Amino acid sequence: MKIVVFGAGGVGGYFGGRLAQAGLDVTFIARGEHLRAMQRDGLRVESIGGDFSVRPVQASDDAASVGLADAVLVCVKAWQVPAAAQAMLPLIGAETAVVYLGNGIDAPRQLAETLGSGPILGGLCRISAFLAAPGLVRHVGIEPAVVIGELDNRPSQRCERLLQAFQHAGVKAEIPPDIHVAIWQKFLFIAAVSGVGALTRAPLGVIRSLPETRQLLAAALGEIEAVGRACGIALPPEAAARTLAMIDRLPGDILPSMQRDIELGRPSELDAQVGTVVSLGQDVNIPTPVNALIYAALLPQELAARGITAAG
């Protein structure tokens, strides 16, 4: 099975590294100094579950040089998905499966606009990892896991093959009964903790401990749950409360990637996470005052990070 990992940051580097370490045929699509470091020195992963490295690494910045893939794991930031879809066209054949493992809920639609609906699977991952230096990924929290499924939830051989590939690599993986529910459960968590974390500039342990910020987090979660239900997603009962209870069990020093990007002054997934909550809320007539406030407060910095000057 020929697997291409499109984007080799925290998510792509960790999961692609595990697959390559297990002997699968894995090629990374990366760029810049990170690509050069992998080509020169291999890929190193520092992990709370045990460090590992892959050397040599198959890596390129040119998808056309790789050839057709059996599976493409899309691991770029949510706002990079449309451009990535164009760049990965040379990888896509009649039997190729494409799955987005990043944050947000809109990537399957965006990928399908360029690649067609046939190759697209639903997916998500659970991990706290980031690119610490060129050629070095650091996994700092959350047991790594991958969830995949056909968008119509039918059983399929391609999902089973991917599932077996991850399991062969020792990665926890599953095909859920409803991939859309699974994606929204992840979205419920990540959009709330990312938004509140980026607004407060505080780690998760502080946010959940202070009564004021805990109330803010609970309110953000409640709004996202209400929007999801109004969008027809069959979230489990008390999804927001269950997510908050899960947050209480996580390491207190976790910083979501959106929060990390915003604190570093980089473009972030603000629109794909908090902005999506607000826009969907407007579409389905569900008020989202907490998420709207978070979005408005963070928007000036997001625009500045993208080099966009608001009219003065």
Image: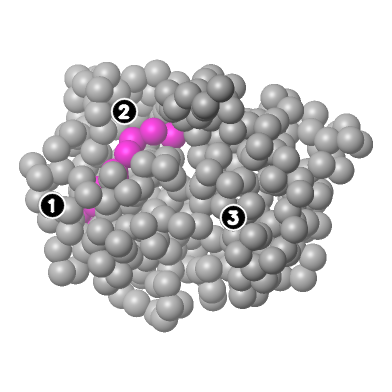
Picture residue at 31% right of the left edge, 28% below the top: 43
As drawn, the label of residue 90 is 1
Q: Residue 244: horizontal and vertical position, in percent?
A: 78, 50
Q: Residues within 10 Å of mark 1 (few under 14, many from 20)?
A: some
Which residue does the image show at 81% across and 50% down from the upper left? Answer: 219
Corner quadrant of residue 167: bottom left
To which residue does mark 3 refer?
279
| Residue 54 horizontal/vertical position (percent) | 29, 32
> Of residues 41 and 170, which is closer to you in this image?
41
Q: Residue 43 — which label?
A: 2
What's the residue type where badge 2 is placed?
Leu
State which tag comes first along the sequence, 1 or 3: 1
Q: Amino acid at mark 3?
A: Ser
CA neighbours of label 3 inside 10 A, class few (<14), some (14 to 19), many (20+) = some
The Cα atoms of the two marked residues, 1 and 3, are separated by 33 Å
Is residue 197 magenta-colored?
no
| Highlighted range, magenta | 1-10
Q: Amino acid at mark 1?
A: Pro
Left or right: residue 269 versus residue 30 is right
